[in-house]
Amino acid sequence: MNYRAVTPLLLSLALLPILLPILGCDKAAPEAPAGSILAISANPTRIALNGQSIITIIGRQPDGNPLNPGTEIRLSATLGSITTLVTTDRNGTATATFTSDGEQGTATITASTGAGGTTSGGGTTSDSSGSSSGVLTTSIGIPVGIPAGPSAASIILQPTPTSLSSSGGTVSLLAIVRDQNGQPLANQGVNFSTDLGTLRSKGATVQTNASGTAKDTLTLTAADLSNNASTVMVTVQTVGSDGKVSTAMSTIHIQGSKPVASFSYSAGSTQLEVQFIDTSTSQGALTYSWNFGDGASSSEQNPSHLYASAGTYTVVLTVTDTSQQSSTATARITVPVTAPGNSG
């Protein structure tokens, strides 16, 4: 017998259990057979703004046995972050950690197998118990930073004051949150935002107190209003435990500098006619009110007026801007007008 030939053979057989896994390392990960079922759950089912939840996915083949070890499960989240790819163990189970990113809302976590990524209509959405099952794909909703209990149904925003001068100032903002029964909703997160200026909260979540109110402060400077803004929009939002977003908006009016009325006048086309030209200054549109001193009036910007007789008349022009600020100019004229003049 050739012992030298048998010895290498025995060594090869002894190493076979070790070599097989190595030789098979390039084999593709197993896929879930068509008709497989996934179940997903979260613990806890509701987390804080910067909290975490353990997501567990359990896969079963059509015959009820666990999915093969190493089956890939793909994960995605509409809010926050989660590992995008996990694999099942010998029990057909895979886990991942979902981490919120400080944004309030309901995060939808979706899990799917490799085959499920190309199959539509095969999944079911999670219910309030925190778990669900479906074919090849499944999902679950996790409230983030949303307190349990009654859901916010409405929100009101009350700014004080509702107008500022062009030099700026501060506005106190009061948000009032009510539930479906019209009762104040405490411990409800709200977020203020503005298109100009600076908020004390800097946009972070503010919790309502026992009266269902949350407060913030808006500061506007002259630099913020340097482009002659006439309004500033402030918005407040809250997300109910049902995922519904309630929004309220309010407008802060910016008053420009007070207008300055003035006018010039000259002889018209006839002896007793006078032509008036508005020379007022303002940051915005004006309305005009002329009193010609003889009982007649006009709302035109540059009117002409025919007097009934020669004489001396006191003409008054009042201009009003969109912020209801007004100014008056007066001139004492002699008709017929022999030389152009201006209001004093």
Image (tube, rainbow, N blue to C red):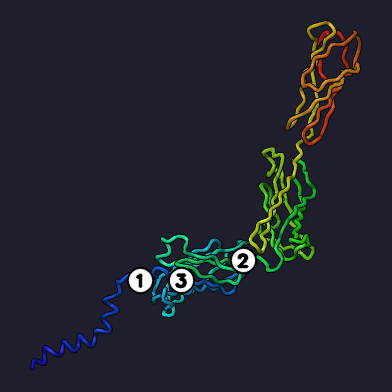
The N terminus lies in quadrant = bottom left
Q: Residues within 10 Å of mark 2 (few under 14, many from 20)?
A: many
Q: Is residue 165 above or below residue 93?
A: above
Nearer to us of marks 2 and 3 is 3
The kind of residue tagged 1 is Ala
Res. 37 mark: 3
First in sequence: mark 2 or mark 3?
A: 3
- Location of mark 1 (residue): 29
> Which corner quadrant of the image does residue 47 belong to?
bottom right
First in sequence: mark 1 or mark 3?
A: 1
Is 20 placed left or right of 225 in the picture?
Answer: left
Q: Nearer the viewer, residue 182 or 294?
A: 182
The percent position of residue 46, horizontal first and vertical second, equals 62, 70
Is 80 placed left or right of 310 in the picture?
Answer: left
- Secondary structure type for disc 2: strand
Marks 3 and 2: in contact by CB < 8 Å? no
The percent position of residue 90, horizontal first and vertical second, equals 41, 80
- Location of mark 2 (residue): 143
